[in-house]
Amino acid sequence: MFYLNIKAQVHLDNSVFAVVKFSYNEPGEMLVTGGICGTGFLINDSTVLLANHILNRSNFIPNPGYKFVQFWLLKRGTKLIIPLSADYLQSMEDIESTVVRLPEIVKCDLLISQDKAKPDEVVQSFGHLNSMPVTDAHWENDTLVIDGYNLEKSKSDASGRIVEIRNISINATDVKLTDVKVIQPSFKGNRGMSGGPLISNQKVIGMMSFGFPADLEIKDTVFAIAIDQIITRLK
């Protein structure tokens, strides 16, 4: 099993976010539903990258049976709460990515790898469980405001080695790719890990995306979109 050292762990936690969604029917009510739906990470001081099937403008909608929805980014390291607006989002469906333009500057400590990933490299993914996080919140008029949170019990990290790197095409309900380079790590995953960074040699080499079996919470096989594919598309 591979573990980052303590310095690298802090370095990463301060650039990784849980993506949280709450749905409700009336402002002021105590009953809300939802929780962590995925993960995102900084690629510069004003931009977060996450998986398109987690969050995009078209799915900025409440859960079935509810009228209203709010999304937040909750940082894993030093506490930071960022309410999200659909206006912050730019979708790149062809590489299963969404770019979030932040309303404030957040120091990015992550480095994007300039080297090509290779089979059998040691890798680690930092993500979250698809569950309700520990939060303190209150209502301000029509807005639900998160005052504090604890993500310790919501973390879902994994480590292993690269099994394979290849181009893939997929036509699933929420993920559609055509000849896109992906990286398959050896570990299993869950839905809340989608959008998290795949790390090798303390640098980002991919963004966790999809897995199989598609209809199960725990995925036996998971894939990350190669980061060079995403950076090329951003340029």
Image (cartoon, rainbow, N blue to C red):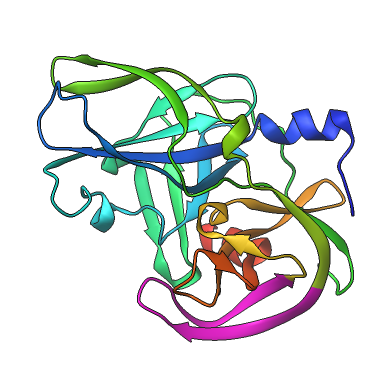
Task: Say if residue 158 shows up in the picture.
Answer: yes
Residue at point 61%, 47% (across, down)? 127
Q: Nearer the viewer, residue 179 or 126?
A: 126
Q: Is residue 174 magenta?
A: yes
Looking at the picture, how far across and down is residue 144, in whole percent?
Answer: 25, 23
Q: How many marks?
A: 0
Residue at point 70%, 71% (across, down)? 183
- Residue 167 location, quadrant: bottom right
- Residue 136 location, quadrant: top left
Looking at the picture, how far across and down is residue 216, in whole percent?
Answer: 49, 70
Looking at the picture, does residue 47 appear above or below residue 216? above
Q: Is residue 168 left or right of residue 187?
A: left
Looking at the picture, how far across and down is residue 101, in whole percent?
Answer: 43, 39
Q: Is residue 127 left or right of residue 6?
A: left
Looking at the picture, does residue 180 appear above or below residue 7? below
Q: Is residue 186 magenta?
A: no
Residue at point 27%, 56% (across, down)? 59
Task: Say if residue 113 shows up in the picture.
Answer: no
Q: Is residue 24 left or right of residue 151?
A: left
Q: Nearer the viewer, residue 100 or 150?
A: 150
Looking at the picture, how far across and down is residue 170, in whole percent?
Answer: 48, 84
Report the span colored magenta. 163-184
User: Which quadrant would the N terminus be assigned to in this image?
Assistant: bottom right
User: Which quadrant would the C terminus be assigned to in this image?
Assistant: bottom right
Query: Which is the main secondary structure of the residues drawn in magenta?
Result: strand
Q: Nearer the viewer, residue 74 or 150?
A: 150
Looking at the picture, does residue 185 appear above or below residue 2? below
Residue at point 68%, 33% (across, down)? 13
Looking at the picture, does residue 20 appear above or below residue 176? above
